[in-house]
Image (cartoon, rainbow, N blue to C red):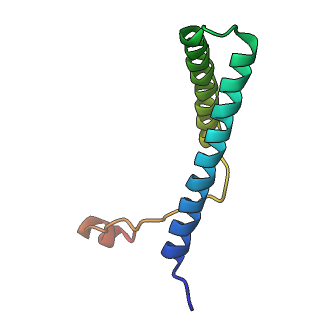
Amino acid sequence: MELKPTYLGTMISLATIAFGLIAAGAWNKFISDAIAAFLRPGNGVLAELIYAVLVTLIAIFVVQGLAKLAQRDIGPKIIIETKRKTSAKDSETGV
């Protein structure tokens, strides 16, 4: 069975997203449990606030890091040459 490149690319993207969601769930549980370990029982709102701030800061750092990575000149350069339209004047001068 031959796989088309677009189909294979889609399957890779879906698998990556699925594993990313699983990893996010694991980190969610870990961070929640770590915060709960340091707080006394009954501090539910405080624990949720700390969790929200912590996750927000992590998200900011990750997005900024990815943005910096995207701005770097990485990968092969693709140069597309376009032909300039010649006018009657260019034809006369030989350009």
Disc tally is: 0
> 70 or 48: nearer the eye?
48
Q: In which quarter of the image is the N terminus?
A: bottom right
Q: Residue at horizontal 67%, vertical 56%?
A: 75
Outermost residue, front direction? 41
Residue 19 point in image, percent of width and height = 63, 53
The vertical placement of 69 against 64, above or below, is below
- Is residue 29 rendered to the left or right of residue 83? right
- Give the residue furthest to the bottom: 1
Residue drawn 55% across and 73% down?
A: 8
Q: In this view, does 83 lie to the left or right of 21?
A: left
Q: Residue 26: give x, y in percent of width and height.
A: 67, 40
Say which quadrant the C terminus sits in.
bottom left
Task: Please provide percent x and percent y for residue 73.
Answer: 65, 46
What residue sits 60% from the left and 42% below the top?
70
Say which quarter of the image contains residue 38.
top right
- For the question of whether residue 78 can be seen, the reply is no
At 31% from the left edge and 68% from the top edge, which residue is drawn? Answer: 86
Q: Is residue 80 above or below residue 73?
A: below
Q: Residue 52 location, x and y as percent?
A: 55, 19
Residue with the most extreme left position: 88
Which of the 4 quarters of the picture holds residue 40? top right
Q: Is residue 55 above or below residue 67?
A: above
Q: Is residue 83 left or right of residue 34?
A: left
Does the image show residue 79?
A: yes
Q: Which of 76 and 15 is in front in this view?
A: 15
